[in-house]
Image (cartoon, rainbow, N blue to C red):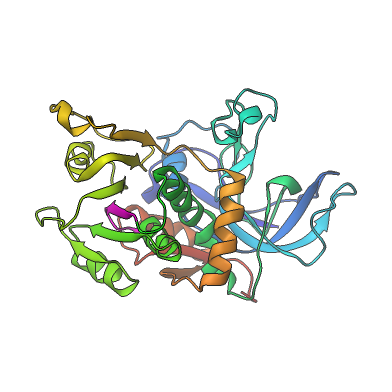
Amino acid sequence: MKAWVLEKQAPIESKPLVLKELSEPHPKANEIRIKNMACGICRTDIHIAEGDLPLKKSPLILGHEIVGVVDEKGVDVKNFNMGDRAGIAWLNSTCGKCKFCQSDRENLCTKAGFTGWDAHGGFAEYTTISADFAFHLTGNQPFVELAPLMCPGIAGYRALSLAGLKSGDKLGVYGFGPTATYVLQTAKQKNIEVYAITRSEKNKNTAREIGADWVGGYDDKIPVKLDAGIIFPPAGNLVSFALSQLDSGGRLVLGPVTMTPIEINDYNLIWQERSITSLAHIFRKDGIEFLKIAGGANFKTFIEVFSFEDLAEALIRVKHGKINGNAVIKIADNV
């Protein structure tokens, strides 16, 4: 099979991924093999390629927004049939035995494995995975539109779940990139008001287009007190700013993997039981719930599609913010 292989971490501009011909993988007894139709590109792929995250496997196939069709399955697999549409996300495996796995917090498992980091990912023609960690994809939506659901979609749903909101509540979304578009559309399905705060005029227009209740910049006064907020930019200075806009009992969710230093100089910002929590990886049940909502909601997607052969150039454009929405590589023709 054809696959883009990372052999040595280096700046993405030097094109460290090399297109190679590898042996096709075959599933173990509890695994399925997916013929990859499309795979989204995530900034985490770039962090791994460039060495911001340590290399856990070498050589390595990156990519964890995988969608395709089951074309082989192990003898013990009961929950997938040949020809099923299926997806693979970031969470690839867990131990199933630790205190986190045993208390419905598998995203915190200390022995968790991740797609495109601990295990080969989707920048290839085929990927294998335990059938328990793959997702069913329903409907006939094009695969290139489904790919971003596997990371920004599910991660956004996780962030929204952590916010703990109910129908009629008010959510502030700080920074309005691709993940925020899924948060907004999911929140509207749950009758939650969304207030989008972003500097970008392009992103403001996107927020209005998909139904934000209010859109403004960081200098504009939000007309209400918020029940929760989600921060997406890795900017620690936004934490105090967002806390100041929360009502009593409000929760602030921090979406980035890393953040610049956070300072809270005024205790009143967290008094009245305001709280802060971070987002760490994803749950399988979040993925199942989100994909069910997305499958029936006709979510609007913002993607730029690249050919499989143009992956190296696409990664450079993603790094430099020159993508309108999510970058997706088309691996097979019938997508």
Q: Is residue 213 left or right of residue 306?
A: left
In the image, residue 125 lies in the stretch drawn in magenta: no
Above or below, 60 relative to 38: above
Q: Is residue 39 left or right of residue 157?
A: right
Residue 227 in the image: x percent, y percent? 30, 48
Above or below, 111 relative to 313: above
Residue 274 appears in view? yes
Residue 13 in the image: x percent, y percent? 37, 50
Which of these two is toward me, 242 or 136?
A: 242
> Bounds of the magenta span?
169-177
Residue situated furthest right in the rendering: 75
Q: Residue at x 46, y 42 (%)?
A: 49
In the image, residue 176 lies in the stretch drawn in magenta: yes
Q: Residue at x 44, y 61 (%)?
A: 190
Q: Residue at x 79, y 57 (%)?
A: 80
Residue 123 appears in view? no
Above or below, 37 relative to 285: below
Residue 257 in the image: x percent, y percent? 39, 38
Quadrant for the C terminus, please: bottom right
Q: Residue at x 57, y 71 (%)?
A: 296
Above or below, 57 relative to 325: above
Q: Is residue 140 left or right of residue 210?
A: right
Q: Is residue 296 left or right of residue 195?
A: right
Quadrant for the N terminus, please: bottom right
Numbered disc total: 0
Q: Which quadrant of the structure image shows residue 125?
A: bottom right
Residue 20 in the image: x percent, y percent? 62, 53
Which of these two is toward me, 314 or 249?
A: 249
Q: Which quadrant of the structure image shows residue 221?
A: bottom left
